[in-house]
Image (cartoon, helix red, strand yellow):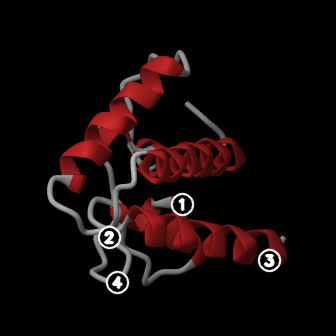
Amino acid sequence: MYTLNETWEHCIKMWQDLVKDLDTNNMQDGCENIDDYVSEFKEKWLVDHDINEDINSNCFFCGYSDDWEGRYYCDQCPGRLVDPKFWCMNSQYSFEIMPRLFLAKLLELNEKRKEAK
């Protein structure tokens, strides 16, 4: 399992790489099948980075909020620890439909997190 800081680092790196890949392939947020693309990219990213742990939803935040019984709780999501209103499926920045806006939200929350230290 990763520390909170490691979780943030891995998560942001994954999303930066994903957005870079989207840009390389000229894919726009909200385009057809982007949700499948995001899911497949995340799975491949973990393999490519030799991350062999079983991470819930291939998401470092979900993995961090797993409890010892293998369940996860959104209220323990690292994003919600910074902003209790954060939700990865928010229609304004949904991770699976608008990955660029989702990355922007992660970066915003990470800055708030760092300022609060």
Q: Are marks 4 and 2 in contact (CB under 8 Å)?
A: yes
- In the picture, measured across the screen, residue 10 lies left or right of residue 25, that is right
Q: Which residue is mark 1?
A: 78
Instruction: Look at 26% across and 44% down and name the residue there.
Output: 37
Nearer the observer: mark 4 or 3; the answer is 4
Which circle's residue, 4 or 3, is located before the other in the chain? 4
Give coordinates of residue 101: x percent, y percent. 46, 73
- In the picture, measured across the screen, residue 30 lies left or right of residue 73, that is left
The residue nearer to you, when weighing 54 against 21, is 21
Cα–Cα gap, marks 4 and 3: 24 Å
Q: Secondary structure at mark 2?
A: loop
Give coordinates of residue 19: x percent, y percent. 49, 53
Q: Which residue is mark 2?
A: 94
Q: Quadrant of residue 28?
A: bottom left
Cα–Cα gap, marks 1 and 3: 14 Å
Q: Which residue is mark 4?
A: 92
Q: Secondary structure at mark 4?
A: loop
Task: Indicate the amino acid at tag 1.
Answer: Pro
Nearer the observer: mark 2 or 1; the answer is 2
Query: Which disc number belongs to residue 116?
Result: 3
Question: Which image quarter holds the N terminus?
Answer: top right
- In the picture, measured across the screen, residue 62 lies left or right of residue 30, that is right
Residue 61 in view, yes or no: yes
Which circle's residue, 1 or 4, is located before the other in the chain? 1
Give coordinates of residue 25: x percent, y percent. 40, 46
Task: Indicate the amino acid at tag 2.
Answer: Ser
Q: Is residue 32 above or below residue 104?
A: above
Nearer the observer: mark 1 or 4; the answer is 4
Cα–Cα gap, marks 4 and 2: 6 Å
